[in-house]
Image (cartoon, helix red, strand yellow):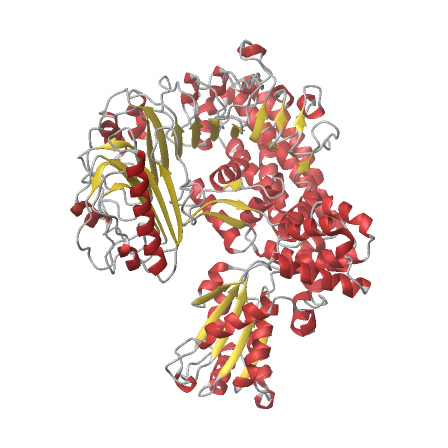
């Protein structure tokens, strides 16, 4: 039902704005307009009720009705947009503030007779369809659906997770180690204080659905409950009745004192619990908490009498887990434990393990389960009833297919609890992930912009669309619905993956609601009603179906890791909103072809009047493939400027050389990524909606319009050094007052012996800036790089001629700095002492050409990775003993550069290398953490090599 509601929400603002505009409508048409407004509001209200009910609990008539509403909404939205764009004489640059301003601009044109007849005919056709839908709503009694749900809820079967509490301990695998670790953490409150004087400690077990949180909590409970005077284990679940929860805990603690407690309200129950628990040592497990408000109320019952009491919660929602104070993140089973559990479940079903009969397919199946106990149990129970010869078929199916199996149904039901607990729009964002193949690394920013283009992200007061979409993304991570992919040491989540269990659930829901249709590009045609078409890992040939078929109703066309010999015919699409070709290859064309003859020319692009997202990336860009002629889209046509609704233009990896001037008319554009070399003709003055801008080789002329882009959140520019060493100074002057900027990245195409840039000494106060990269030689640390001008800076990367000791002291005052990279032409001078607590959050430090670094006690207390790039010069000896002052150090990387032609012979070079390595090795050996050490040598002009005589040197620095 989510899709039908989404379609309606996308349509209503446009339809009502159109119908209530300043148009001279005759009497009959005005009545039709009033009817449409009244009925669409009524339909939307009924649809909201249906959307609140899980689809498996809806009757067939309600499903049919919702699907009809969805299709009607799509058709009406296409009609409204086509009508508006089709009006002649509209200034394409007259829409700086959105759809409402655009409608006002064309309002006067509706007085023309032809336009009046067009809208009259369209409304009459729509009215007939809406009347039919309204009649079906009454006939199917859609408005009674919530009452029907309440009635069925009264006889809802027992939550399958509750059975975990009564599992035979012999069926548990790999539980001992995490159980013992949890018990140790619970006991480590204060070893020097007796249990009778310990404070109450609350710990939360957090993790993915099906990971075994309840099982682990029950194992801990069974192991230590004898040490406590009062104990209780209670599962809360979704939408709890808090009175029943408090009553349940009370009954488990002391049944004898529970006379007439059912007459008590929540406040009196809390008072009763506090009375029972006062001056007693208690252990209480609150299992499966879903929201913070419920936890805050339950927590009121736990009094702290300094008796060493313990409370354990379990949740799959990170925000809830944080409320406990101490978090234990439940990890998947190891490969060995996974195999053990798999074989045990097979034995239960078949009385003997068949793992050995097909080791290879068994290992592939276990890899698919990802160490999730519930997944392993489910698939093993499924396989137990099948011969080994059928196992490859099970593996090849998506998830667990449509098997009629009790374990499969239970697994899906557990995951669906998480899905239906999500707010409305994040549900749609999760379903969208069904367009991607298994195990694909989905880039965060690209994904969010697709959500925006699909209409799944709606603006909130004071927030941009990307910011709202990012909140949805983080919510899906916190709810354990997607898996975060984080850059080591950077505290940056740049991508996500979808666990196969969740992907199976997404496909299950998508098929039920006809959300995404997966097509084999050349052999299987999609359904004629498909609105979203996704092809993955396929070859799209010139005579294939997908390349040539008419798909007038398709709103999203997504291809991931596909091989194209021809671009899809754009003239086949009439309603397309999203065109995304991600990590694909485009091959078979010769560069000598004229652009219009290329199979990758964007012919008829201007016909895609509804397009919001155009993204194309070629995985071969930047790579040379011997014997292969690689040719991409040769030209972006001027007609791209006619795409008045376009919000995202992502051509960062296509090899396209230039953008037409008409891109400057795309006033709705929020994200522009382009990697070509000719953008000097682009006028960005009217692109005032831009939130993200990534361009390659820009000119000084282009920079003049940047100051008008007040919505910019991220800017990444590459330029050639030859333009002018004043470029950086001018650039900073243009963007110094863009207060929404969070990311600034400037990269210069460096040449040998570069000249330093002219520094910018003006005022820069960017309170939201998180990331600053300047890959161009600056004469020194700019005066505006300090904690008062950039208070929230987290990541800083600079190239400087030299640094002074006071510069390090200035950087040490950044309270949020996580990574710091400083590349020097000269040498850095470290101060003999730093302020206590300098660099409080720094996790990664990279230095090039630093004179002997000195780390003092009390500074950089959270540094985990140190990378050092040093040149071969004669010194009085190397001493890295001060590394011991970095208490959390995990990794040390050293790259030693040099040139034997600069007065250093091979023998001297080798001797100094040995000294440097010996000093580093001694430093990590005496460090309490024994950090991992990697040393690289590149002391000749031709080579960058590992030192063969040093046994602990390994790996390539990235």
In depth, the one of 131 and 845 nearer the eye is: 845
The x, y position of residue 455, in whole percent, is 53, 38
The x, y position of residue 506, in whole percent, is 64, 47
Q: From this viewpoint, is residue 409 visible?
A: no
The x, y position of residue 728, in whole percent, is 25, 29
Q: From this viewpoint, is residue 616 visible?
A: yes
In depth, the one of 174 and 810 nearer the eye is: 174
In the rendered structure, the answer to whether residue 718 lies left or right of residue 303 reads left
In depth, the one of 73 and 446 nearer the eye is: 446
In the rendered structure, the answer to whether residue 516 lies left or right of residue 496 reads right
In the rendered structure, the answer to whether residue 290 lies left or right of residue 859 reads right
Residue 600, above or below 464: above
Q: Residue at x 34, y 31 (%)?
A: 940
Q: Quadrant of residue 6?
A: top right
Quarter occupied by the C terminus: top left
Q: Quadrant of residue 411?
A: bottom right
Q: Residue at x 40, y 42 (%)?
A: 947
The x, y position of residue 801, in whole percent, is 21, 34
Residue 527, above or below 219: above
């Amino acid at each position: 039902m989510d899709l039908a509601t989404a379609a309606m929400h996308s349509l209503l603002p446009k339809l009502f704005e159109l119908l209530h505009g300043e148009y001279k409508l005759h009497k009959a048409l005005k009545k039709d307009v009033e009817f449409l407004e009244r009925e669409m509001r009524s339909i939307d209200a009924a649809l909201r009720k249906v959307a609140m009910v899980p689809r498996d609990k809806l009757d067939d008539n309600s499903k049919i009705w919702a699907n009809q509403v969805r299709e009607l909404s799509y058709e009406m939205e296409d009609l409204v947009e086509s009508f508006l764009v089709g009006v002649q004489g509209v200034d394409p640059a007259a829409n700086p503030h959105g759809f409402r301003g655009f409608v006002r601009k064309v309002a006067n044109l509706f007085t023309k007779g032809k336009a009046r007849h067009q809208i009259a005919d369209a409304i009459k056709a729509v009215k007939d369809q809406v009347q039919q839908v309204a009649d079906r709503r009454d006939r199917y009694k859609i408005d009674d659906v919530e009452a029907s749900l309440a009635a069925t809820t009264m006889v809802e079967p027992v939550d399958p997770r509750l059975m975990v509490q009564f599992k035979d301990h012999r069926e548990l695998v790999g539980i001992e180690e995490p159980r013992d670790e949890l018990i140790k953490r619970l006991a480590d409150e204060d070893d020097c204080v007796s249990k009778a004087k310990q404070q109450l400690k609350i710990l939360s077990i957090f993790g993915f659905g099906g990971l075994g949180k309840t099982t682990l909590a029950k194992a801990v409970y069974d192991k230590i409950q004898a040490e406590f005077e009062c104990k209780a284990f209670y599962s809360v679940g979704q939408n709890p009745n808090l009175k029943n929860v408090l009553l349940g805990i009370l009954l488990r603690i002391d049944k004898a004192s529970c006379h007439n407690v059912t007459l008590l309200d929540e406040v009196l129950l809390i008072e009763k619990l506090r009375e029972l628990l006062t001056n007693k040592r208690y252990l209480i497990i609150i299992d499966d908490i879903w929201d913070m408000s419920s936890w805050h109320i339950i927590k009121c019952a736990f009094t702290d009498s300094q008796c060493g009491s313990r409370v354990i919660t379990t949740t799959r929602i990170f925000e809830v887990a944080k409320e406990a104070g101490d978090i234990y993140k439940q990890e998947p089973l190891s490969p060995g434990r996974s195999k053990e559990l798999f074989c045990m479940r097979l034995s239960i079903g078949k009385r003997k393990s068949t793992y050995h009969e097909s080791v290879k397919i068994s290992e592939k199946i276990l890899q698919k389960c990802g160490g999730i106990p519930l997944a392993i149990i489910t698939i093993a129970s499924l396989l137990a009833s099948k011969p080994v010869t059928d196992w490859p078929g099970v593996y090849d199916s998506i998830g667990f297919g449509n098997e009629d199996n009790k374990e499969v149904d239970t697994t899906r039901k557990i995951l669906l609890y998480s899905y239906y607990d999500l707010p409305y729009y994040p549900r749609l964002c999760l379903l969208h992930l069904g367009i991607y193949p298994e195990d694909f690394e989905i880039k965060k920013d690209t994904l969010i912009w697709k959500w925006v283009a699909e209409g799944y992200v709606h603006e909130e007061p004071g927030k941009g669309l990307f910011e709202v979409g990012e909140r949805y993304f983080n919510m899906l991570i916190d709810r354990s619905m997607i898996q975060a992919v984080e850059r080591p040491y950077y505290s940056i989540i740049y991508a996500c993956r979808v666990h196969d269990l969740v992907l199976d659930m997404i496909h299950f829901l998508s098929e039920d609601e006809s959300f995404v249709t997966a097509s084999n590009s050349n052999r299987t045609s999609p359904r004629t009603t498909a609105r979203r078409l996704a092809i993955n890992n396929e070859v799209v040939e010139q005579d294939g179906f997908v390349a040539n078929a008419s798909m007038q109703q398709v709103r999203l066309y997504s291809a991931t890791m596909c091989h194209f010999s021809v671009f899809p015919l754009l003239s086949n699409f009439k309603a397309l909103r999203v065109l995304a070709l991600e990590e694909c290859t485009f091959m078979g064309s010769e560069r000598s072809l004229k652009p219009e003859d290329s199979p990758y020319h964007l012919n008829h692009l201007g016909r895609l009047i509804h397009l919001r997202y155009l993204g194309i990336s070629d995985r071969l860009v930047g790579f040379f493939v011997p014997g292969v002629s690689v040719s991409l889209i040769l030209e972006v046509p001027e007609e791209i400027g006619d795409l008045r609704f376009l919000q995202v233009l992502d051509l960062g990896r296509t090899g396209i050389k230039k953008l037409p001037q008409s891109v400057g008319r795309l006033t709705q554009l929020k994200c522009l990524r382009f990697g070509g070399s000719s953008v000097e003709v682009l006028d960005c003055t009217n692109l005032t909606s831009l939130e993200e801008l990534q361009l390659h080789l820009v000119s000084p002329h282009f920079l003049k319009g940047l100051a008008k882009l007040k919505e910019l959140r991220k800017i990444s520019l590459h330029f050639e050094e030859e333009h002018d060493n004043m470029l950086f100074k001018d650039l900073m002057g243009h963007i110094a007052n863009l207060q929404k900027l969070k990311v600034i990245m400037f990269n210069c195409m460096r040449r040998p012996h570069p000249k330093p840039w002219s520094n910018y000494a003006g005022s820069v106060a960017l309170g939201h800036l998180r990331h600053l990269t300047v890959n161009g030689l600056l004469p020194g640390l700019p005066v505006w790089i300090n904690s008062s001008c950039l208070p929230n800076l987290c990541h800083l990367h600079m190239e400087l001629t030299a640094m002074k000791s006071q510069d390090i002291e200035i950087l040490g005052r950044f309270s949020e700095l996580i990574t710091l990279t400083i590349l020097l032409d000269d040498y850095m001078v470290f101060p003999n002492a730093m302020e206590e607590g300098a660099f409080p959050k720094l996790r990664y430090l990279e230095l090039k050409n630093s004179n002997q670094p000195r780390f003092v006690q009390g500074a950089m207390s959270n540094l985990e990775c140190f990378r050092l790039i040093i040149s071969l010069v004669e010194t009085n000896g190397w001493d890295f003993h001060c590394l011991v002052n970095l208490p959390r150090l995990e990794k040390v990387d050293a790259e030693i550069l040099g040139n034997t032609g600069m007065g250093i012979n091979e023998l001297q070079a080798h001797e100094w290398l040995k000294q440097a390595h010996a000093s580093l090795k001694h430093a990590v050996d005496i460090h309490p953490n024994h950090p991992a050490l990697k040393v690289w040598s590149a002391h000749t002009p031709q080579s960058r090599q590992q030192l063969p005589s040093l046994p602990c040197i390994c790996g390539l620095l990235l």
